[in-house]
Amino acid sequence: MKFKKSLGQHFLRDKRFVRKILKNLHLDGETVLEIGAGSGVMTRHIINRKVKRLYCLEKDLSLIPILKERFLSERVEIVNEDILGFNIGSLGDNIVVFGNIPFNISNRLIRYLIDNRRFVKKAYLTFQKEFAHRLAASCNTRAYGYLSCFVQYYAKIRILFDIPKEAFYPKPKVDASFVEMDFCGYPLFRVGDESLFFKLIRKAFSSRRKKVINSLSGLKDKENLKKAFSSLKLDTSSRAENLSLKDYYNLYLRAFT
């Protein structure tokens, strides 16, 4: 099967990791949306699960006849669309999303899922390893940043396992990670003005070497910031990566509302 570099296609060929992914997928009784079904390597396993319905989304028109020939079933629908323009709400609620996605759409796909989170129960996705570890990073680590806070506000992130680049064809330049995003019960806390909340976090991380209190002084006067830090028992010498998402939430409440 020919691959299209322009679509960022990398097909998972190593059966050991196919089995590992299947072991970590919880799909019984679920409506599933598979992103980038390709030739159906994973599709044939998913349809053997007790899924309620499976929607196979594939952007590459040349693969649609192959999928339709292999998966003729009342429970399967083959859709020739780009996920980033797809109306996921048309499938109903509590959708479980699965996919080995092109690395070059990772940021946009994260935003898409967050924007459509009212329809999505969980997502199981393969990302570039470095990107995945940024999503799941904890405070006081190098990988922790604005993206970590943004995504973890909306979903629980778990890296299930890493996948070496040799497991794919054609082989990408980097390793991958298989990630679970759970939207159930999130956000754990709600802010009145999400735009302002994420603005202050982005501002804090815009100069990682600076103390947070100095980075945020353009949004709030330093004296009020010092009072907020003191009342929250936060170290005024803290840098952006030293504050947890909950710390940023408390700071938002104390100094910006």
Image (tube, rainbow, N blue to C red):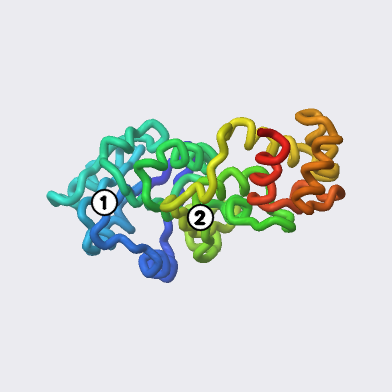
The residue type indicated by label 2 comes to Lys
| Vertical placement of residue 158 versus 154, above or below | below
- Residue shown at 47% from the left, 49% from the top: 186
* Residue 127 located left or right of residue 124: right
Please tell me which residue is depicted at 66% across the width and 40% down the height of the picture.
253
Circle 2: element type: strand
SS for tag 1?
A: strand
Seen from the viewer's position, the closer of residues 132 and 216 is 216
> In the rendered structure, which disc, 2 or 1, sits on the residue that comes first in sequence?
1
Q: Which residue is mark 1?
A: 31
Compared to residue 246, the image places residue 167 above or below, namely below
Instruction: State the residue at coordinates (53%, 61%).
Output: 159
Tell me the tag on residue 156. Answer: 2
Residue 199: quarter of image: top right
Q: Is residue 54 left or right of residue 171?
A: left
Give the residue displayed 58% in from the left and 58% down from the top.
Answer: 175
Residue 209, picture quadrant = top right
Amino acid under label 1? Answer: Thr
